[in-house]
Each structure stands twice: as structure tokens, then as C-alpha cells.
Amino acid sequence: MLKCLCKNESIPNSISCIEKALANILNEEANKIKKATCLSNNICDLIKINESVNQTIKNIILLEQVLCTKLDIYNSKKI
């Protein structure tokens, strides 16, 4: 579970903190692919890394859906 380091713990701010963390994770996954393509000529290794990155992206998509639902609920109660 991600620990939000933002001082203001409102729902929009907590979502924002998580979004920043997810952006960092995506950036590191891109770096992983760049490094792997530079260092490896083995197609099996590259496929394994690609599958790992794909799984991470799928998990991020699921979390994005949860965050979107959380924000929708927050906005509906705010009105």
C-alpha cells in the first residue's frame, strides 16, 4: 500500500499523491525497458521483461479505475 506523504489528507489530495507515485512507477517501467533493450540481445529475456511491465501497467489501470470511482463518489457527495 502506498503511503501518502502529502500534509493535507483530503480525498483529492490523497488521490493526487497516489497519481504522482503511479507516474513515478510508470517512468521506472519505461527505464526498465530502455535498459533491457540496451543490455540484452536475448529475446526470451526481453519478452519476460515486457510481460512484467505489462502486468505492472494492468495493475496501475485497475488502481486508476478505483481512484476514478473514489473521486466520482467524492464529487457526488460534494454537490
Image (cartoon, helix red, strand yellow):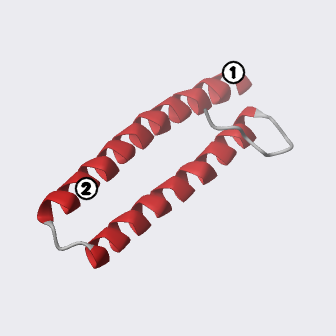
Q: Which mark is residue 2?
A: none
Taking 25 as reference, is 72 above or below it?
above
Query: Which residue shows up at 73% across the image and 41% down it?
Result: 4
Tell me the crowding category of disc 1: few under 14, some 14 to 19, or many 20 or more residues within 10 angstroms, Cα based.
few
Q: Report the front residue among 40 and 31.
A: 40
Quadrant of the image containing the C terminus: top right
Q: Report the front residue among 16 and 74.
A: 16
State the image coordinates of residue 70 (x, y, percent, origin top left).
59, 28
Q: Report the front residue among 48 and 68.
A: 48
Residue 58: image quadrant is: top left
Q: How many marks?
A: 2
Q: Is residue 5 left or right of residue 2?
A: right
Q: Please tell me whether mark 1 or mark 2 is closer to you in this view.
A: 2
Query: Which residue shows up at 85% across the image and 41% down it?
Result: 8
* Label 1 residue SS: helix
Report which residue position mark 2 lands on. Answer: 50
Query: Which residue shows up at 60% across the image and 32% down it?
Result: 1
Is label 1 in contact with label 2 (beta carbons under 8 Å)? Answer: no
Residue type, numbered disc 1:
Lys
State the image coordinates of residue 36 (x, y, percent, origin top left).
31, 69
State the image coordinates of residue 12 (x, y, percent, origin top left).
71, 39
Query: Which residue shows up at 30% across the image and 78% down it?
Result: 38
Residue type, numbered disc 2:
Asn
* Label 2 residue SS: helix
Who comes first in sequence, dot 1 or dot 2? 2
Residue 67: image quadrant is: top right
Cα distance in 3D space between marks 1 and 2? 41 Å
Q: Report the front residue among 36 and 75.
A: 36
Report which residue position mark 1 lands on. Answer: 77
Taking 15 as reference, is 23 above or below it?
below
Q: Residue furthest left?
A: 43
Taking 2 as reference, is 6 above or below it?
below
